Image: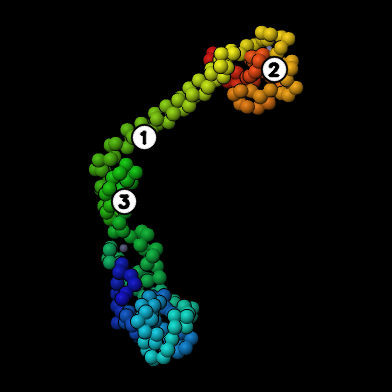
């Protein structure tokens, strides 16, 4: 019924019986006590007990889960936190129980995974065997190649994207057969410069463009602003 199986008590016999749970007979873990009779148990122990019967295990009075509150008495919690334990994994001794979670974070026997696990290395093992594994991990040789490929792939994506924009630009310039021009080809009818009351929109960037900023247009319809034209015109 002990909550944690990652440490063991070093000298449980020296722990005052007042600090032990009458259900599991170990020092309290997350102790709770009733407002009916004041008896105290580990939270997990009494929760399990109350599933069977709604009485206090010590005095048999009727109690409900709602009668239990966490013990907040400093001195009790401090005594519990200071109980010395031994790490089952690394055998380190004299760890204060309250510090055991900190110990777990840095325990040399904790289970870790290979730092090449992003390359699907499935190795897991103890922290103090990690560097030995990584020296010989087959994925170690692959890592630079993968890095290089990813790098090339990124460059390639940029190139492809630039080319796609270049193609879009050329298609806009071709304007469905009504090729855009730097000057008017039919001055009297020019929809873009003469007859349009609004600022025409650049077909590439879609922003309204003042006449002075139009680089090319077709008199029927369509134009490109100077910014887009200079950016995409293949030079
Ligand atoms: Zn208990
Ligand atoms: Zn009781
Ligand atoms: Zn340890
Ligand atoms: Zn590995
Ligand atoms: Zn534009
Ligand atoms: Zn025109």
Residue occupying the point 56% across, 16% down: 176
Q: Label 1 belongs to which residue?
A: 147
Nearest to N terminus: mark 1 or mark 2: 1
Disc number placed over residue 192 in the picture, else none: 2
Nearest to N terminus: mark 2 or mark 3: 3
Residue occupying the point 41% across, 83% down: 40
* Disc 3 + disc 1, Cβ < 8 Å: no
**Residue 12, how many percent across, how many down?**
30, 79
Residue 80 in view? no
- How far apart are the alpha carbons under marks 3 and 1? 20 Å
In the figure, is residue 132 to the left or right of 43?
A: left
| Disc 3 element | strand
| Discs 1/2, front | 2
| Disc 1 element | helix
**Residue 68, how many percent across, how many down?**
46, 81
| Discs 2/3, front | 2
Residue 174 in view? yes
Pointer 3 local density, CA inside 10 Å: few below 14, some 14–19, many at least 20? some
Residue occupying the point 29% across, 40% down: 140
- How far apart are the alpha carbons under marks 2 and 3? 65 Å
- How far apart are the alpha carbons under marks 1 and 2? 51 Å
- What kind of colouring is applied to the model shown? rainbow
Disc number placed over residue 35 in the picture, else none: none
Q: Label 3 belongs to which residue?
A: 113
**Residue 106, how many percent across, how many down?**
36, 59
């Amino acid at each position: 019924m002990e909550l944690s199986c990652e440490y063991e008590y070093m000298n449980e016999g020296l722990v005052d019986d007042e600090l032990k749970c009458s259900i599991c007979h170990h020092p309290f873990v997350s102790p709770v006590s009733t407002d009916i009779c004041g008896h105290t148990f580990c939270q997990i122990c009494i929760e399990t007990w109350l599933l069977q019967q709604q009485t206090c295990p010590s005095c048999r009075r009727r109690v409900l889960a709602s009668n239990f509150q966490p013990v907040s008495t400093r001195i009790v919690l401090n005594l519990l936190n200071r109980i010395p334990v031994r790490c089952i994994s690394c055998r380190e001794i004299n760890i204060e129980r309250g510090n055991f979670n900190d110990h777990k974070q840095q325990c040399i026997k904790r289970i870790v995974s290979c730092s090449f696990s992003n390359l699907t290395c499935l190795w897991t093992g103890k922290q103090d065997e990690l560097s030995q594994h990584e020296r010989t991990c087959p994925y170690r040789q692959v890592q630079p190649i993968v890095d290089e490929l990813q790098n090339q792939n990124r460059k390639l994506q940029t190139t492809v994207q630039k080319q796609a924009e270049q193609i879009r630009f050329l298609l806009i310039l071709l304007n469905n057969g009504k090729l855009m021009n730097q000057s008017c080809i039919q001055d009297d009818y020019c929809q873009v410069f003469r007859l349009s009351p609004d600022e025409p929109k650049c077909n590439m960037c879609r922003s309204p463009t003042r006449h002075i900023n139009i680089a090319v247009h077709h008199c029927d319809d369509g134009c490109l602003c100077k910014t887009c034209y200079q950016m995409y015109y293949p030079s």
